């Protein structure tokens, strides 16, 4: 119950108590006054009548005495008038039944009016001849008292309504700053930090608002400081300070993680780039010129990588590496050719003295290479390129360069359209478990399709092709529909279900409208659904992600950022992006029990996430030592083969 409502109720009760007390006192006072008037009226009449009857009593004129009594009694103000001789003989007696007209019976029963007897003596000379007794009629008094009570009641009621109305308006005005404080507190919970510029006139409320403003600024500064410190730590540990690319350390860690995660890296290419004679370049032009050359190479790599799923790093000196996901030999060759052309353009811009700028070696990942083997093949290709001539590139040559499931775009267009039309998808589920007690928080749906030869293809194989071919929206619709059927089959209850959506899907307004309608028709799915978006894809379209989170969030859907921290994107955007979960990229989790830098980064990130009311989840937990380290670092939950294997359609049973 709100404070204003409580104050209104208390004020109303107090006013009713005062009103009832005042009203009862008024009625009681009026009743006492009328009773006193009745007594005085009866006594005055008795005294007057006693004096008037004395001459007639002396002459024993009963007729005149009767006429005089009748004259008084006929006015109707008396219940009884009697004249009794001293010896007890009744001389005159008149009685009028008491009639109370227009007054409720309960009122008469509730208020009892006293009608005392008025007495007087009739004297004959110095002797007492008779006694006069007069009782006033209470009927008229009750009618007068009733009219007075009704008038007083309506007066008090009208005054009460007016005072309560004015009090309600005044209370709303006085408590309005508290509503602003409430909205400010809610905004802080939503990662917004508004400051109230209009201060209330009441001193106590002004102090509250000023304190809230100070707290808002302080919380905002603390979060910003934590974000800056975390980003600085990450940059120092994993970023090349000259180019802004990843350094060798982070590249090796990330590549090792991807090679163990077929859902994310099923196929791809590794390019090693080396500039010729960079040491002599530094000696002749200076280190500042050398740094400028490195930044130019980095800018060229960024420009070429934009259409691809790339991860670039500087190995140190004049060596660069680029990892490209989901490409075959032909695409990798075209990419290497573009890099070589970009190196030649550096000479044309006057950044190098010789036309021979550098070389490129290319190796393809075939699904079984270790990190050492993959790097070795790329290095051998680089040496071969250096032997081939100026600015050459070379693809590592083996007979099995192409995997059986790496096909041309035409094949994938036909295959994926058939998958969508025939609804040929398979969902596997992996649990996400709480660090606190090991309970299942939710399950992530992982998409598979089955090839004609019976092999199951991971999403990392066909999802990139679906995006290139513009089929990701239809594929994501199919996944949501499949989840809806799973939830309907399971009935009420069950675990939450997380599903990844493609970046191109999120940017499609038509899909968002479709999803809103579908979830509106299936509230059980909406209350259990978690939409996961890759951090890289979300950062590129923050406005679209905000629209998605706000629209489906109203239905109970949660939103999560996947592979968080993979790129070097400043994550200050989290403060105004309403998400519920962050999933730390597995490259930070692998071997975290031994990596102090990763431990500090994850611990700092946990504090930032909790300050923004976001739960932090670790991906790719593969060992008990990693799990124990994460529990100690403040992470909320984890996911990986150590915590749970993949199970087909298990969520339908949950």
Image (spheres, rainbow, N blue to C red):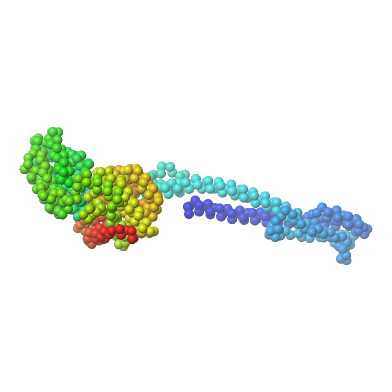
Q: Nearer the viewer, residue 86 or 374?
A: 374
At 18% from the left and 41% from the top, the residue drawn is 301
**Image coords of residue 492 (percent x, y):** 39, 59
In the displayed structure, would residue 10 be above or below residue 358?
Answer: below
Q: Is residue 362 left or right of residue 635?
A: left
**Image coords of residue 525 (percent x, y):** 37, 54
At 16% from the left and 47% from the top, the residue drawn is 269
Q: Nearer the viewer, residue 309 or 11?
A: 309
Answer whether residue 113 is visible to the viewer in this image. Answer: yes
At 27% from the left and 47% from the top, the residue drawn is 417
Image quadrant where residue 94 sits: bottom right
Image quadrant where residue 107 sits: bottom right
Q: Is residue 417 left or right of residue 268?
A: right
Q: Nearer the viewer, residue 654 or 537?
A: 654
Farthest residue toward the right? Answer: 59
Farthest residue toward the left? Answer: 387
Image quarter in which the C terminus is found = bottom left
Q: How many numbered circles are shown?
A: 0
Q: Nearer the viewer, residue 647 or 205?
A: 647
Image quadrant where residue 33 sits: bottom right
**Image coords of residue 296 (percent x, y):** 17, 38
Answer whether residue 254 is visible to the viewer in this image. Answer: no
**Image coords of residue 21 (percent x, y):** 62, 56
In the displayed structure, would residue 507 be above or below residue 30?
Answer: above
Q: Is residue 143 left or right of residue 441?
A: right
At 28% from the left and 55% from the top, the residue drawn is 426
């Amino acid at each position: 119950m709100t404070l204003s409502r409580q104050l209104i109720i208390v004020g109303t009760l107090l006013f009713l108590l005062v009103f009832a007390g005042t009203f009862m006192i008024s009625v009681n006072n009026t009743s006492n006054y009328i009773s006193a008037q009745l007594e005085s009226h009866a006594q005055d009449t008795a005294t007057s009548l006693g004096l008037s009857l004395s001459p007639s009593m002396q002459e024993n004129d009963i007729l005149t005495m009767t006429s005089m009594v009748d004259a008084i009694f006929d006015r109707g103000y008396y219940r009884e008038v009697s004249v009794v001789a001293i010896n007890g003989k009744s001389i005159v007696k008149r009685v009028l039944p008491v009639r109370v007209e227009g007054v409720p019976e309960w009122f008469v029963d509730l208020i009892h009016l006293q009608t005392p007897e008025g007495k007087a003596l009739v004297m004959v000379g110095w002797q007492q001849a008779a006694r006069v007794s007069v009782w006033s009629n209470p009927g008229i008094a009750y009618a007068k008292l009733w009219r007075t009570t009704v008038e007083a009641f309506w007066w008090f009621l009208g005054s009460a309504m007016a005072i309560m109305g004015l009090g309600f308006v005044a209370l709303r005005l006085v408590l309005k700053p508290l509503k602003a404080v409430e909205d400010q507190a809610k905004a802080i919970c939503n990662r917004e930090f508004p400051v109230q510029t209009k201060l209330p006139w009441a001193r106590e409320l002004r102090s509250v608002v000023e304190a809230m403003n100070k707290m808002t600024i302080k919380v905002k500064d603390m979060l910003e400081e934590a974000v800056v410190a975390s980003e600085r730590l990450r940059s120092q540990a994993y970023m090349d300070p000259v180019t802004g690319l990843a350094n060798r350390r982070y590249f090796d860690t990330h590549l090792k993680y991807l090679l163990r995660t077929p859902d994310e890296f099923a196929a791809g290419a590794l390019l090693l780039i080396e500039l010729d004679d960079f040491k002599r370049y530094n000696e002749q032009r200076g280190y500042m010129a050398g740094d400028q050359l490195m930044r130019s190479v980095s800018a060229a790599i960024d420009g070429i990588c934009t259409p691809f799923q790339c991860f670039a790093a500087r190995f140190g000196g004049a060596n660069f590496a680029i990892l490209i996901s989901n490409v075959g030999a032909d695409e990798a060759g075209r990419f290497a050719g573009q890099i070589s052309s970009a190196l030649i353009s550096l000479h044309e811009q006057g950044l190098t003295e010789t036309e021979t700028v550098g070389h490129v070696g290319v190796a393809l990942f075939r699904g079984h290479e270790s990190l050492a083997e993959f790097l070795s093949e790329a290095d051998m290709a680089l040496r071969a390129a250096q032997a081939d001539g100026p600015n050459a590139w070379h693809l590592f040559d083996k007979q099995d360069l192409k995997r059986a499931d790496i096909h041309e775009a035409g094949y994938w267009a036909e295959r994926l359209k058939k998958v969508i039309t025939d609804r040929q998808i398979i969902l596997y589920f992996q649990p996400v478990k709480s660090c606190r007690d090991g309970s299942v928080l939710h399950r992530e749906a992982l998409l598979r399709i089955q090839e004609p030869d019976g092999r199951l293809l991971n999403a990392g194989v066909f999802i990139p092709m679906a995006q290139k071919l513009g089929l990701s929206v239809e594929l994501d619709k199919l996944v949501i529909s499949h989840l809806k059927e799973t939830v309907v089959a399971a009935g009420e209850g069950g675990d939450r279900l997380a599903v990844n959506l493609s970046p191109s899907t999120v940017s499609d307004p038509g899909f968002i409208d479709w999803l809103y309608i579908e979830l509106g028709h299936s509230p059980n799915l909406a209350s259990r659904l978690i939409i996961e978006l890759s951090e890289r894809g979300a950062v590129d379209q923050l406005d679209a992600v905000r629209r998605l989170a706000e629209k489906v969030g109203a239905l109970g859907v949660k939103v999560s950022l996947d592979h968080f921290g993979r790129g070097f994107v400043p994550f200050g955007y989290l403060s105004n992006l309403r998400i519920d979960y962050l999933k730390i990229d597995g490259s930070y989790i692998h071997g975290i029990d031994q990596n102090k830098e990763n431990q500090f980064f994850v611990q700092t990130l946990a504090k930032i996430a909790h300050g923004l009311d976001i739960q932090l989840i670790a991906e790719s937990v593969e060992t008990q030592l990693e799990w124990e380290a994460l529990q100690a670092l403040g992470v909320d939950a984890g996911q990986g083969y150590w915590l749970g294997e993949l199970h087909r359609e298990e969520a339908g049973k949950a």
